[in-house]
Image (tube, helix red, strand yellow):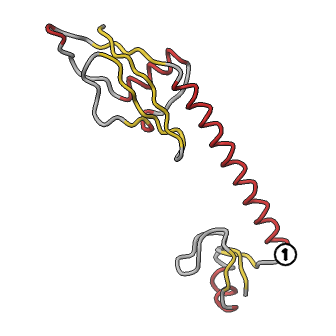
Amino acid sequence: MKVILIQDVKSLGKKGDIVNASDGYARNMLFPKKLAIPATDGAVKDLAAKKRGEEKQAQQALEAAENLKKEIESKSVDVRIKVGENGRVFGSVSTKEIAEAVKTQLGMELDKKKMILEHPIKELGTTAVDIRLHPQVTAALKVNVKEA
């Protein structure tokens, strides 16, 4: 019997797959537990339309991330930090402080968890901070660390 999986089934396939299952397994296991539905013509057409909609949404999300990348890379953010004698920096600049500076200076909401920073910034000057906007899109934000 052909069935469309509604959820991932370990030994059968992933959500959205059309698979062959034995009649008894489908009737006694998959259908009662709402893991699958029969693969009728209408259900197959609905699945195809749903996949097209998901692909369109994924494409729009990618385009939005590309546009945001262009906007982020054209701007920079200033972060102030205390500096002592001989130019020694007290503390460091973390992703939390960068996210707050972006919010106040640029009016954008960026998640601090999506910022890729190998180690906190501990010197004055300009540093590029990578921000993962989408699995396929990463933007580089210029962060100017200045004396407070």
User: Where in the figure is residue 27, as x and y percent of width and height?
Assistant: 70, 86
How many discs mark residues in the rendered view? 1
* Residue at mark 1: 41
Q: Secondary structure at mark 1?
A: helix
Left or right: 46 in relation to 134: right
Splitting the image into 4 quarters, where does residue 61 fall?
top right
Left or right: 41 in relation to 126: right
Q: Residue furthest right?
A: 42
User: Where in the figure is residue 85, as x and y percent of width and height?
Assistant: 14, 7
Note whether 75 is above or below 31 in the view shown.
above
Q: Residue furthest left?
A: 86
Quarter of the picture holding the C terminus: top left
**Near-viewer residue (134 or 10):** 134
**Near-viewer residue (139 or 79):** 139
Left or right: 127 in relation to 75: left
* Mark 1 crowdedness (10 Å alpha carbons): few <14, some 14-19, many ≥20: few
User: Where in the figure is residue 41, as x and y percent of width and height?
Assistant: 84, 75
Splitting the image into 4 quarters, where does residue 130 fall?
top left
Determine the residue positioned at 65% across, 39% down: 63
Determine the residue positioned at 47% across, 18% down: 76
Under mark 1, the amino acid is: Asp
User: Where in the figure is residue 57, as x and y percent of width and height?
Assistant: 70, 48
Splitting the image into 4 quarters, where does residue 48 fall?
bottom right
Determine the residue positioned at 46% across, 35% down: 131
Left or right: 97 in relation to 54: left
Quarter of the picture holding the N terminus: bottom right
Note whether 124 is above or below 114 in the view shown.
above
Note whether 122 is above or below 52 in the view shown.
above
